[in-house]
């Protein structure tokens, strides 16, 4: 195995299988690149932070997958999501807290549940050409 070492012990090597790897001074893998598949992987023994003075862009031809057993947080001043179709599956509770909620639908809107309740401190208004109950 061909290897380059820094004075503090980090090293870069091309393994027998052709994979390029970077290791820290404890021998933990930090980066791997497989030229046969074109796949690259970054490993962080602790937290990983990506910072930019501009925009961080993730561009993938076959999708983006995020997997974590812990919490996934998004903190932003404004969030825009664009998709042809979007699906959200939550096993237990989906809780939304907002100052206001507006849903705009061009076609039909369907809400299905075993039971349903609309609760308001003020008036509840239903407006439509025909309102069918029951």
Image (cartoon, rainbow, N blue to C red):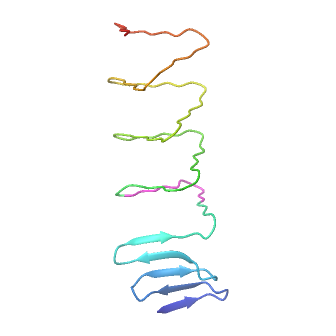
Judge whether residue 52 is colored magenta.
yes
Residue 82 as seen in the image, left or right of residue 73: left
Residue 8: percent from the left, percent from the top? 67, 86
How would you classify the magenta stretch by its main secondary structure? loop
Q: Residue furthest right?
A: 8
- x, y (%) of residue 99? 61, 26
Residue 11 at what x, y percent from top left? 57, 85
The answer to whether residue 76 is above or below residue 8 is above
* Residue furthest out toward the bottom: 1
The image quarter in which residue 16 lies = bottom left
Where does the image place residue 83, in percent across and percent down from the top left? 38, 41
Which residue shows up at 64% across the image and 87% down it? 9
User: For the point 56% across and 8% down, which residue is it?
Assistant: 123
Quadrant occupied by the C terminus: top left
* Residue farthest to the left, as pictured: 107
The residue under the point 52% across, 91% down is: 3
The reply to whether the magenta stretch includes residue 131 is: no
* Front-lying residue, 26 or 84: 26
Report the side of 21 relative to 10 (left or right): left
What span is in magenta? 51-60
Measured along the vertical axis of the image, is residue 6 above or below residue 80?
below
Q: How many marks?
A: 0
Q: Is residue 72 left or right of residue 81?
A: right
């Amino acid at each position: 195995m061909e290897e380059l070492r820094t004075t503090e012990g980090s090293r870069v090597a091309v393994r027998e299988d052709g994979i390029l790897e970077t290791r820290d001074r404890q021998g933990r893998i930090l980066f791997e690149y497989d030229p046969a598949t074109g796949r690259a992987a970054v490993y962080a023994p602790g937290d990983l932070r990506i910072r930019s003075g501009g925009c961080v862009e993730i561009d993938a031809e076959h999708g983006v997958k995020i997997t974590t057993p812990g919490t996934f947080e998004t903190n932003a001043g404004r969030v825009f999501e664009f998709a042809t179709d979007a699906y959200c599956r939550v096993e237990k509770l989906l809780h939304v807290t907002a100052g206001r909620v507006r849903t705009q639908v061009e076609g039909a809107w369907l809400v299905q549940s075993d039971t349903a309740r609309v609760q308001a401190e003020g008036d509840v208004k239903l407006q439509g050409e025909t309102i069918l109950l029951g």
